[in-house]
Amino acid sequence: MRRSIRSSRSLARPYRDLVWIAYLTLPPALGEERRLVLAHRLAAAALARHHGRDPIGLRKALLRRTLHRLITPWAGRLTRMETVPALTRGADVAFTTELDALRPAARAAYALLRMEGRPEPEVRAILAGARVADPAGALAAVAALEARFGDGAAVMFRPAADPTLARCYARPLNRRIRIGLPAVAVVCLLTGLTALSLPEGPETATAQPPPAVAAGAAAPRAITASPGAWRAGTDLDLATWSARGSLTGDRALITRALRAWGRPDGQVLYAGRLDGSTVVLVRQGEQVARYTEDGGAGELATFPAPRPKPDGASPLKLTTTGEGSRYLLPPWVREVSAAPLAGSHPNWRKVRVEDGVTAPVKTPAGKGCWRGPVLRLRAPEIAHGMPYTMVDFGRLSLANAYYQPPPPAEINRYGPSELDTVPGGFTAWKGLGCAMERPEGEIQAATVWEFWRGGLPEGAHGRWVCLRLTDATGGSTVRGVLFSTAGGRTATTLTGDRANSWDCSRLRRDVLMGAWWRAPSGKGYYVAAGSRRVVRITLNGRAVAGASAVSRRRAPSLSGVNELGEKIEALR
């Protein structure tokens, strides 16, 4: 900064707040020291460039830089002091740990909402100005986190480490590092690189490939699983995937990928040339990075690793071009077919596979709709060997796709069926493609629970479904959708949502929803329906026997009772 914080009290408060925001937004995987150093640098740079700008604009500028730029492997490392945030609230470590596990945009929302006390509309505006794709989703993640810690969490909890209070420890430089520092300084000056933030989650960052390493710096270590490692145990997770691709022996390429990620080591899952680009997929712990070089530039994106599954493991997306997407398959998968979410039945077409990588699978275009694709995979050597279906939501991994039909079909005690094995499953999924936007985040499982089907006012027909989405961290989102058909045309109505609950799962099978619905004649009705065990619905104090009810009032009170006499809370 051109101006010292010590000599300007007017800069001290915004500086402290900006450090908080940057620190919470930066990925915890950097480590405490680098995260702390970079948070201070980003705050100082924001004030130096944008001091005098309104507080909202200043925070937009800071978050644009923090969320969307790539960190150089040496950024935050070349310091002679070891700085560690002071632990000021040790009792809140559990909350801090879960906060660190949220996506960067959600951590930024927490800093703005709770550390600065800004109202939600203002936070939403700041995140949108920082080019966050889903500000409402970031706020919802904060609300869900606080809900898990009980009432008053918003007030009681703050991160256990305050990045504006730190303990400093001297760390002498050895001779080799002192010799190497001028070389690093020259490289930085020539390339014009500065300390930037590492993207995490949906953001993607671009930077030139890192230059040669200064003397004394150790090269990152590449780890590979032996071929057939998945046959040696029962834990079929990413650690058992052998490295595939024609460039797995290219040590320089793998080193560039790991340096761009800022990791000392990583398991190589794939390295090769695809569709004119060089692609490297590496894993460390619960994170996966996809590094791509195209025309001399390197691009890195990081994602949560898919959760281990006993049989229905997900492929990992390698590239997406105009020809379609290519996927790296689990080593035990032997057959793949693909179909778009279109038509009344899936039109499966076999996909060619070479060295564990699929040929391009086309993503069907649909005006205002997302159409998959849906993959059907088969692993004859695993469990029952039956095919399983997965939906591409546009992220690294795919989501297991299931369907639960309405009564009189029974509920399978082992869980819902694959979407193509039960009549009505594919059409329900097809309708969802146009009823709602494609879900954000790394979705691991998606279940369409059709809990009611029957007549609506004025001769219309209804299908009511509950879509349950489970993400990579174990969190969940439930959304209700009513399909109504009249005169050969089908309309959709969104009927509520809830985060991190048991709704529409084997742990809570009773479902009750209500919505204001407009008939083809233009008249409005409040319609309500429940799942198979619902025996009575009460609208505004008027009880109706059965699993459906209608009112002309716009938003009446709604409750239900199941066959055991238990009250059912409506999903709104």
Image (cartoon, helix red, strand yellow):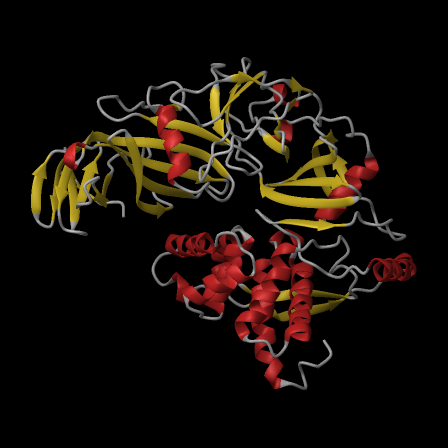
Residue 553's place in the image compared with 287, above or below, is below
174 sits left or right of 317 in the view: right
Residue 191 at least partly seen: yes
Residue 77's place in the image compared with 356, above or below, is below
Q: Quadrant of the N terminus?
A: bottom right
Residue 74's place in the image compared with 116, above or below, is above
Instruction: Name the one closer to the observer, 218 or 134.
Output: 134
Q: Quadrant of residue 280?
A: top right
278 sits left or right of 462 in the view: right
Residue at 39 percent across and 24 percent down: it is 426
Residue at 68 percent across and 73 percent down: it is 49
Instruction: Name the one closer to the observer, 49 or 472.
Output: 49
Q: Position of residue 62 (x, y in %)?
A: 61, 65
Instruction: Name the one closer to the observer, 113 or 435.
Output: 435
Instruction: Name the one closer to the observer, 100 or 278.
Output: 278
Q: Position of residue 273 (x, y in %)?
A: 75, 30
Residue 502 at least partly seen: no
95 sits left or right of 453 in the view: right
472 sits left or right of 355 in the view: left
Q: How many marks?
A: 0
Q: Position of residue 311 (x, y in %)?
A: 51, 23
Q: Position of residue 473 (x, y in %)?
A: 49, 43
